[in-house]
Image: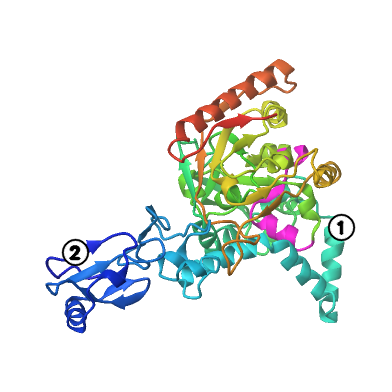
Amino acid sequence: MSSGASDKEEVSGSSSLSSMTTSPELKAAGKDIGDVLVNGHSNGYGDKDGNAIKVNGGSAGHVQGHAQGHEQENGQLNGQGNGHEQENGQGYSQAHGYGNDDKTFAPLLIPLERRLQTLALVWHTCTIPILTSFFFLSLAIPQFWPLITIYLLFYFFWDETASNGEAFYRRSDYMRNLRLWKYYVDYFPIKIHKTCDLEPTFTEQEVDVLFYKFPFNYLPKFITNILNNLRIIKVHTKTIKKDVKTGPRYIFGYHPHGVISLGITGAVASNGAGFEKMFPGIKVFLLTLANQFKLPIHRDYLLSLGISSVSKHNVMELIRNHDASVCIVVGGASESLLSVPGRNDIVLNKRKGFIKIALELGDVVLVPIYGFGETDIYEVFQPEPDGKLQILVKFQLWLKKHSGFTVPFFHARGIFNYDFGLLPYRKNIDIVFGRGIKVPFRPSPTIDEINHYHGLYVNELKRLFDANRERFGAGELRIVS
């Protein structure tokens, strides 16, 4: 709105326009000075001296629209500083003059950047049906049958990558650096905050390596050694830059689980939030249930992002054989049922397996992580265990017992609406990394040793939460079991 005219009077509230002088001459005088935007319509009104009057109108007495950035509505700023809407019934449609009647529908004139962010979320949350459907569709095309046969034979009889530590070789920097993940983290947005530096596990150094020239470099090693001993071929030396282990390995523990842990996926399973820039030299693998690796094609998608099985054998092999670091969502399926907006209930007291693994391996640092906002991105329905819908609770517990995972009853927003659907709300997820806890090598740790380091971990997590709860508007932290 223009502010160049002098002696303007601004009227707030829901004043009745019928009580104002509205003669044709005065209307003309008001329009000469400047149009006034009221609920998205330009109207000029004048006072008895012919000066323009700006009227903040609307059903709640507020201007709809914006002069620069987002206007305030009902005393609160619609949207966040970076242009994200608040989608709990208020939001982008209102802040840009679409009116209260349109608040449940996503307007068509949203910038392309935001549509791409939504598309990135749709892709990742729907990869199971999309990739599985693609696999079954390929079965209907005879030209694909030879490839599918080879793939299935490899999958069923040889490939145990997700559970034997060899996921280290399936991790793809190309996949993790796709522009898709930048859109993914900007959707909420997801931000990483560190409270201290972590020593890199790997440091790039120049090293001398031995090699054989083409075509001998493709021969098995025992053959090249024989040929070299017989002086038939010559070994050569060259200097290359290589990642050399110089620091400890890490076991990161993420809390809370939330509905489907979308926050830590964006932060660790990709570089969209800048993990490798913030913590260089640490190759981290996000761990999930082994069941997810039983789906063709989808399993390869997860492996390319550095996502692997949470089984003990796999964790031991990743860390021991490859000096990799892992991130475990400690609360697991039990904690997903506790995910309620505004609450911070976690399962930790009985989770001690990762402490035992750290002691058995040695040269490991435990790092607690808390994702503020992880539980706020979905609305969750929690049926009463002894209520009319107790059968739903029994179903959730049965599913958890027999499959290792469960399904909270949740909803949030859709692609084209803001009040119902399976896409998460656009709410900040701030992931804060705590201080490391150095763990010694104990090949056969005692119960007391496990409890001691578990206690240190719990205390650091509480300290991390309390130090940041006011900053991110969180309530109390409750360890329920």
Magenta stretch encompasses residue 217: no
- Label 2 belongs to which residue? 9
Asked if 144 appears above or below 152 in the picture, the reply is below
**Crowding at mark 1 (Cα within 10 Å: few <14, some 14-19, many 20+):** few
> Residue at coordinates 75% horizontally, 47% vertically from top-left?
289
Which segment is the magenta one? 296-315
- Mark 1–mark 2 Cα distance, whole angstroms, equals 77 Å
- Quarter occupied by the C terminus: top right
- Name the residue beneath numbered marker 1: 156
In-front residue for pair 381/239: 381
Look at 71% across and 30% down and name the residue there: 351
Residue placed most toward the observer, 182 or 306? 182
Q: Quadrant of the N terminus?
A: bottom left
Quick check: marks 1 and 2 in contact, CB under 8 Å? Answer: no
Q: Determine whether, in the image, residue 192 is placed left or right of residue 225.
A: left
Which quadrant of the view contains residue 414? bottom right
The three-letter code of the residue at mark 1 reads: Phe
Does residue 303 belong to the magenta stretch? yes
Q: Is residue 25 above or below residue 120?
A: below
Q: Position of residue 117 (x, y in %)?
A: 53, 64
In-front residue for pair 135/41: 41
